Amino acid sequence: MARIGIVTGGAQGIGKGIVQHLIAEGWRVASIDKDGVAARALAADMPTDRLLSLQADVGDEAGVADAFAAIGQWLDGDEAPGIDLLVSNAGLADPVSGPIERLSLKDWRQWQDSHVTGAFLMTRAAVPLLRARKGSIVLMASTRAIQSEPQCEAYAAAKGALLALNHALAISLGPDIRCNAILPGWIETGPWAKPSARKAAEHRDVDREQHPVGRVGEPRDIAATVAFLASEGAAFITGQQIAVDGGMTRKMIYAH
């Protein structure tokens, strides 16, 4: 019987890497992404018997309800209805929100809704399905939940909230459902792959070299960690926050 997962933000970046990794391991995956073009492109690239690719805004209650209605139809007829994994990965990828004195309440709420409200709405909807298979949850936080660079207040606050939500869910939902958080470091995707509020759109050599492992991360590094946390090998791990950052947060001084 194939294991079944839901991945938000699954049509691009880290989320796409997770979807590809799980499907390669034999999972069936429902991907939810706000970007309809990316969602359709993902569907065209993946086996139709393994992937359900949906367009929805996980920060919108009605959108989440519609997505789960479609997932329910997709699961209809399974011998053991339910899911084994929820990966809450969706959210505004660019961490830079600008000077705090010019940050609007509307923009602040966009960061919170895309990361925190989305994780809440998805978890609330997924819990009955997860309980049916004693599944697990992975929340995608960030190293910026525990350290900062300038002008990242909205992003850092949202990712920090996910760490608190993580341990709260682990206690409330155990023993049937485990919950863990991953803190990606610099990953070669997202805002680094295109111009953004950052000063540079690409990692520099010095950015790579200052990591103890000698490189920045790739989506496959995060995907492999997700797969482990969803496995029986991680059955005694819950409520934890795991930095997947090439040792970045263990180095005291960074080069700029």
Image (tube, helix red, strand yellow):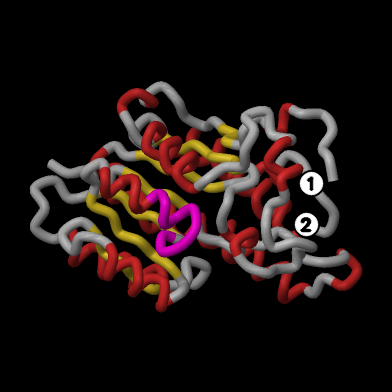
* Helix, strand or loop for disc 2: loop
Residue that extends furthest to the front in the rendered view of this protein: 205
Task: Give the residue type that dot 1 points to.
Answer: Ser
Where residue 243 sits in the image (x, y, percent)? 60, 34
Residue placed at 43% from the left, 67% from the top? 33
Relative to 65, is 47 above or below?
above
Whether 132 is among the magenta residues is no
From where the camera sits, is residue 5 visible?
A: yes
| Image x and y of residue 197, in percent | 75, 67
Residue 54, image x, y percentages: 33, 70
Q: Main secondary structure of the magenta part?
A: helix
In the figure, is residue 38 to the left or right of 189? Answer: left
Instruction: Find out whether the residues at labels 1 and 2 contact each other: C-beta distance under 8 Å.
Output: yes
Mark sitting on residue 152: 2
- The quadrant holding residue 106 is bottom right
Q: Which residues are magenta?
A: 10-18
Q: Is residue 16 magenta?
A: yes
Residue at 24% across / 46% down in the picture?
A: 27
For the image, the number of numbered tags is 2
| 156, 255: nearer the viewer | 255
Location of residue 234 by image quarter: top left
Circle 1 residue:
148
Question: Going by the image, does 6 lie left or right of 252?
Answer: left
